[in-house]
């Protein structure tokens, strides 16, 4: 039980793989995004790639912070999306803009959730403020040299 006491919450959002779930073994091996950490329950809120939402203890998850995938010109890393060519969230050249869903994800919300409309407006406002202040769009994390 000492291990549970010592859990230091991960930097979120982070890509995760589900493991060791005894009650629902079909979840094991599924990939998702850990969106938020609840210190009271000591669980992560996770959205699986299947869109299922669950809360899981840290020892049921393997964080995969260096995992990235590219689909249709979109690079996804730790639940955030970027233009795969230029590795930025807002790319005029490729006419892609993921700033708003990225802010939602960074705040622990699921941008796919239809209930996120109000939060979506907040994220939109946040992005507008950032751009107004001349803050550049997020860039995808640099890959460690050894990765894949």
Image: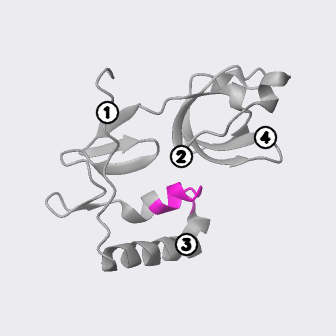
Q: Marks 1 and 3, how far apart in space?
A: 33 Å
- The spot of residue 31 in percent (x, y) is 53, 31
Q: Mark 1 vs mark 3: which is more N-terminal?
A: 3
Q: Which mark, residue 117? A: 3
**Of pointers 2 and 3, the one earlier in the residue sequence:** 2
Q: Picture coordinates of residue 41 (x, y %)?
A: 82, 44
State which tag comes first along the sequence, 1 or 4. Answer: 4
10 Å crowding of disc 3: few (<14), some (14-19), many (20+): few
Q: Residue at position x 58%, y 67% from top? A: 116
The image quadrant that residue 52 belongs to is top right
Q: Which mark is residue 143?
A: 1
Q: Which residues are magenta?
A: 103-113
In the displayed structure, does residue 77 sit left or right of residue 94? right
Foreground disc of the pair 1, 3: 1
* Residue at (25% x, 44% y) in the render: 72
Among the 4 quarters of the image, the one containing residue 66: top left
Q: Which residue is rendered at x = 49% and y = 29% of the image?
A: 64
Marks 2/3: CA–CA distance = 20 Å
Question: Who is closer to the viewer here, 8 or 30?
Answer: 8
**In this rendering, position of residue 98 left or right of residue 5:** left
Q: Residue furthest left?
A: 93
| Total numbered labels | 4
User: Does the magenta run of residues contain 61?
Assistant: no
Residue at the disc numbered 2:
13
Q: Position of residue 5 (x, y in %)?
A: 81, 31
Rounded to the nearest whole Å, what is the CA distance between mark 1 and mark 4?
Answer: 30 Å
| Crowd tier of the residue under label 4, counting other residues whose Cα lies within 10 Å: few below 14, some 14–19, many 20 or above | some
Q: Which mark is residue 71?
A: none
Q: From the viewer's perspective, is 139 left or right of 110? A: left
Q: Secondary structure at mark 3?
A: helix
């Amino acid at each position: 039980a000492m291990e549970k006491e010592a859990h230091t919450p991960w930097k979120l959002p982070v890509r995760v793989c589900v493991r060791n779930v005894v009650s629902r073994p079909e979840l094991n091996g599924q990939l998702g995004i850990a969106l938020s950490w609840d210190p009271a329950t000591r669980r992560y809120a996770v959205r699986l790639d299947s869109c299922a939402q669950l809360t899981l203890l840290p020892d049921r998850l393997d964080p995969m912070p260096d995992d990235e995938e590219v689909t249709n010109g979109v690079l996804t890393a730790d639940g955030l999306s970027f233009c795969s060519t230029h590795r930025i969230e807002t790319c005029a050249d490729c006419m892609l803009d993921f700033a708003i869903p990225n802010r939602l994800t960074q705040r622990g919300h699921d941008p796919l959730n239809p209930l996120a409309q109000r939060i979506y407006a907040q994220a939109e406002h946040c992005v507008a403020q950032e751009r107004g202040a001349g803050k550049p769009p997020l860039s995808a994390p640099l890959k460690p040299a050894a990765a894949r």
